[in-house]
Amino acid sequence: MKNQKPLTTGQVAAYCHVSHVTVLKWIKEGRLKAYTIPSGHYRIQKPDFHEFLVQHKMPIDEAFFAEEAVKVLVVDDDAKTYELIASALDEYEFASATNGFEAGLRLANFQPGLLILNLDMAGIDALEVCQSVKANPATKRTRILVLAKSAEEKAVSEALACGADGYLVKPLKVEELKQKVQGLMGRGR
């Protein structure tokens, strides 16, 4: 249950079919562990909520507590690059796109947590993609990893300035890829 977003008191209330006030009472009585964010609202970690449910013999929906796989969209016209990435990062859920139109559709429908984008693909303005992803409220939290032919390539610094979160140089090295992705997604192994 690591690396999951904390729950709001409203989400806990909906899960337990109780009012928001009841959840606040549990927190204030010390029965449910919670912390406050700067705005004064409470947040509950999923493991703490799970423990609360066990202690109080309440039903547990295992699907609710399952760790979500991070979704990765690979935008590259090289099938071998996609295969290497998908096999190296097998704990993630994947989709691919080989052109700009397909990439736009996949971004909207698949909603990836990570976009791996080839800077050197014909027919795609990778810098514009980076800017658009970061400017859109629905996708601005998507991490972007760009792939380049060379670290000295001008496009790398431009992509980073346009919102890319990191880069790798082709040909990809599996260990370097894993480390970079785990770092970007906050998943240490």
Image (cartoon, rainbow, N blue to C red):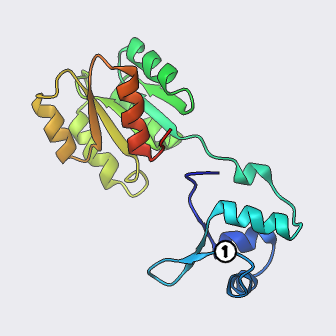
- Mark 1: which amino acid? Lys
- Left or right: where 118 falls relative to 95: left
Numbered marks: total = 1
Q: Is residue 172 above or below residue 67?
A: above
Residue at the top extreme, as displayed? 80
In the picture, residue 58 is in which quadrant?
bottom right
Please tell me whether residue 81 is drawn above or below residue 24 in the rendered image. Answer: above
Q: Is residue 155 above or below residue 16?
A: above
Q: Which quadrant of the view contains residue 18?
A: bottom right
Q: Residue at x 14, y 40 (%)?
A: 158
Q: Which residue is mark 1?
A: 33
- Whether residue 187 is visible to the viewer of this picture, yes or no, is yes
Q: Nearer the viewer, residue 65 or 164?
A: 65
In the rendered image, the vertical position of residue 5 relative to residue 92, given as above or below: below
As drawn, the residue found furthest toward the front would be 189
Res. 102 visible in picture: no
Residue 179 image offset from top left, x and y in percent: 39, 34
Instruction: Give the residue drawn at x 38%, y 17%.
Output: 81
Measured from the top left, where is residue 49 in percent x and y? 71, 66
**Residue occupying the point 50% across, 84% down:** 40
Using residue 137 as the reference point, say whether residue 131 is left or right of it. left
SS class of the residue under badge 1? loop
For label 1, count other residues whose C-alpha is less than 10 Å away and answer few (under 14), some (14-19) or many (20+).
some
What residue is drawn where x is 17% and y is 47%?
161
Front-most of 101 and 133? 133
Q: Position of residue 154 (x, y in %)?
A: 10, 32
**Of the pair 52 and 7, the residue shown nearer to us:** 52
> Residue 138, image x and y in percent?
43, 54
Identify which residue, 96 or 82, lies in the foreground: 82
